[in-house]
Amino acid sequence: MPDRFATVVTCIDGRIHEPLGDWLRDRLGVDYLDMITEPGPDRLLAAARPAELDRLLTAIGVSERAHGSDTLVLAGHADCAGNPVDDGEHHTQLRRAAARLAVLLPGTRILAVHTGSCGTGCWRPYLVDERPPAGAVKSQSDTAPWDRKESSRSSVAGKT
C-alpha cells in the first residue's frame, strides 16, 4: 500500500505540532503530514493578498503533486503570537479560509481545525469546519465518528 499524505497549513508554534499531528493521523488515517508553517495562518489565509495566497497555493500544490495529498488541513490555535485573537475569531477566520480555499481547490477535502489549550503544556485539536471536494457527497459514515466526538468535547471545553 502506498504512503498516504495530508497537507497541513499550520502555525510555526511548535507547541501544537505533535498533538495536532497525532490527532490528524488518527482521524485521517494518513501516514505522513506535509507541514507548511506560517505565523497566524488562519488570519493569513482568511485575508491573504494574491501574492501571499499564490505562495501558499504553490506549496500546497507541491504536496498534492508529489505525494498525492487530497486533504488540506488549515490549523489555528489558542495563544497564537502571530494572530493574538480569541478562539471565536480564530474559528471565524478558519471558516472563512476554508470557504475561500474550497473555491480555489475544488478537488480537495478541506478541514479547518483549531487547537485549544487544555492546561499548561496540554493542547487539544478539534474540528471547526469541513469542506468536502466539489461534487462529493458527505455521508454520515464519513463524519460521524469524529464529528460527534469533537462536538461533545468542544462543548465540554467551552468551545463552540
Image (cartoon, rainbow, N blue to C red):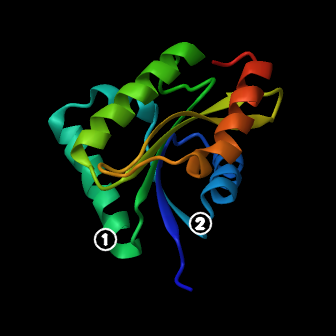
Looking at the picture, which amino acid does disc 1 mark? Arg
Asked if 141 appears above or below 42 in the picture, the reply is: below
Name the amino acid type tagged 2. Val
For this rendering, which residue is in front, 99 or 142? 142
Who is closer to the viewer here, 38 or 67? Answer: 67
Residue lying at 36% horizontally and 26% vertically, measured from the top left: 96
Q: Is residue 143 left or right of residue 109?
A: right
- Residue 102, image quadrant: top left
For label 2, the residue is: 30
Looking at the figure, which quarter contains the N terminus? Answer: bottom right
Q: Earlier in the sequence, mark 1 or mark 2?
A: 2
Residue 83 is tagged as none
With 84 as the anchor, is 54 left or right in this view?
left
| Position in image of residue 79 (x %, y %) | 63, 23
Instruction: Look at mark 1 in the image and give the residue it sits on.
Output: 65
**Residue 93: x percent and y percent?**
42, 23
Q: Where does residue 126 sit, x and y in percent of width and height?
A: 65, 35
Residue depicted at 80% across the width and 21% down the height = 156
Asked if residue 20 lies left or right of residue 122, the reply is left
Instruction: Give the percent coordinates (x, y) of residue 75.
Output: 52, 39
Looking at the image, which residue sits at the far right?
120
Mark 2 Cα-neighbour bin, 10 Å: few <14, some 14–19, many ≥20? some
Is residue 17 shown above or below 100?
below
- Mark 1: which secondary structure? helix
What is the secondary structure assignment of the residue under circle 2? Answer: loop
Residue 61 visible at all = yes
Q: In this view, which residue lies farthest toward the left?
A: 50
Residue visible at 35% across and 51% down in the picture: 133
Q: Quadrant of the C terminus?
A: top right
User: Crowding near pointer 1: few (<14 within 10 Å), some, many (20+)?
Assistant: few
Can residue 16 be seen here? no
